[in-house]
Image (cartoon, rainbow, N blue to C red):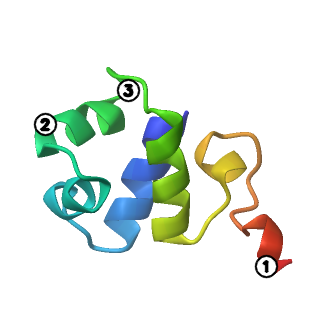
Amino acid sequence: MYFRRIYELREDNDITQKSVAEYLGMQPNVYRRYEKGTRAIPVEAVIKLADYYRVSTDYLLGRTDDPTPPNVK
């Protein structure tokens, strides 16, 4: 589920995979596998992605449909 969310967030914000990979400090091919769902995302990357897109980690992980981070409510 999370791979769809990170793909949609990236596309909705018109950001390249390369830019996100650079932000996370990894090679674009590694990030590409996260979006395809062929590689598990480390917790540290989930947290960084949530901060990057200003959404909750629960939203990224598919535990809720509410993207609002907990400290914004």
Amino acid type at circle 2 is Asn
Amino acid type at circle 1 is Val
Residue at 33 percent across and 63 percent down: it is 11
Please give the residue where the numbered disc 3 appears in the rendered image. 37
Q: Nearer the viewer, residue 35 or 54?
A: 54
Q: Which callout, 2 or 3, points at the residue further toward the start of the chain? A: 2
Q: Which callout, 1 or 2, points at the residue further toward the start of the chain? A: 2
Check residue 72 in the rendering and tell me which mark sits there, or answer none.
1
Mark 3 Cα-neighbour bin, 10 Å: few <14, some 14–19, many ≥20: some
Q: Considering only vertical position in the picture, is 43 above or below 70? A: above
Please give the residue where the numbered disc 2 appears in the rendered image. 29
Residue at 59 percent across and 48 percent down: it is 60
Give the side of residue 11 with respect to residue 27, left or right.
Answer: right
Q: Considering only vertical position in the picture, is 68 above or below 57? A: below
Q: Considering only vertical position in the picture, is 60 above or below 37? A: below
Q: Nearer the viewer, residue 17 or 44?
A: 44
The residue most toward the bottom is 72
The residue most toward the right is 73
Cα separation, mark 3 vs mark 1, equals 29 Å
Cα separation, mark 1 vs mark 2, equals 33 Å
The residue most toward the top is 38
